[in-house]
Image (cartoon, rainbow, N blue to C red):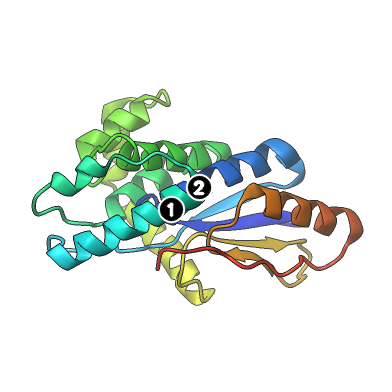
Amino acid sequence: MSKPHLVYFADPMCSWCWGFSPVIEAISQRFGPSLPIRLIMGGLRPWTKEPMTAQERSDVRSHWQHVYEASGQPFDFTFFERERFIYDTEPASRAVVVLRRRGAAMGIAALRRIHRAFYAENCDVTDASTLADLAAEFGMDRAEFRDAFDSEAVREETRGDFAIAQSAGVRGFPTLIAGKGDDNPYAIVTRGFQPGAHLLPALEQWLGKETAIPPLEASGACG
């Protein structure tokens, strides 16, 4: 892009990204088209094959509790009553990519909806039928979604997102970076969760005064 913009590295099954979701929404509402957001799927745990162990369930539950305390976002902890859940983040990421093809704003909205379905509604967003139902909420025909979701082109685009995150050195989510185009270097806005009360003033200063984004201390990240 040749104008100021943000690049958001996230995962639809990252609890800190769910906590960060209202902040991304606030940025979109505050700056609108003057600060577009490019969404990249980070690839938290793609292609996982084994069910969660008891230790992994305990660790994830602890993360969820921390995110709830930091962000106030709702969580349905009955998720932990599931048995042999395979925490594969690739299908949900691929679903976001399908909807992102309909526009950047649609991609952000799809990420937010899948987050809510997984964390607040205890939906299995590793399941293609569940993802098709969520896509239908955005007006996409279920059969059309499944065709795109199963296509090699979308699989490759999703793998491409993961590769971009890796090549950029992004190891934790959420990660938000800012650039002004024309080969100017990118600046880190945050690696990990930050409340909007911290981020929005920093972005306003960066946009309005051509200054560097002040360094911010993040609260947590999925990685």
Residue ranking furthest to the front: 69
Q: Secondary structure at mark 2?
A: helix
Q: Residue at x 76, y 65 (%)?
A: 213
Q: CA distance from mark 1 to mark 2?
A: 6 Å
> Which numbered dot is residue 71?
2
Q: Is residue 195 visible?
A: yes
Where is residue 159 drawn, in percent x and y? 37, 62
| Residues at marks 1 and 2 touching, judged by CB atoms closer than 8 Å | yes
The image shows residue 32 at horizontal and vertical percentages of: 72, 38
Of residues 96 and 151, the one drawn nearer to the viewer in this rendering: 96
Residue 4, horizontal then vertical, whole percent: 76, 55
Q: Residue at x 30, y 34 (%)?
A: 121
Q: Is residue 3 visible?
A: no
Q: In the image, residue 52 lies at what x, y percent?
A: 16, 61
In the image as oriented, which residue stretches furthest toward the left?
Answer: 83
Q: Which residue is mark 1?
A: 67
Mark 1 is on which residue type? Val
- Badge 1: few (under 14), some or many (20 or more) residues near its Cα, within 10 Å? many
* Res 132 → quadrant: top left
Specify the quadrant that holds the N terminus. Answer: bottom right
Q: In front here: 166 or 221?
A: 221
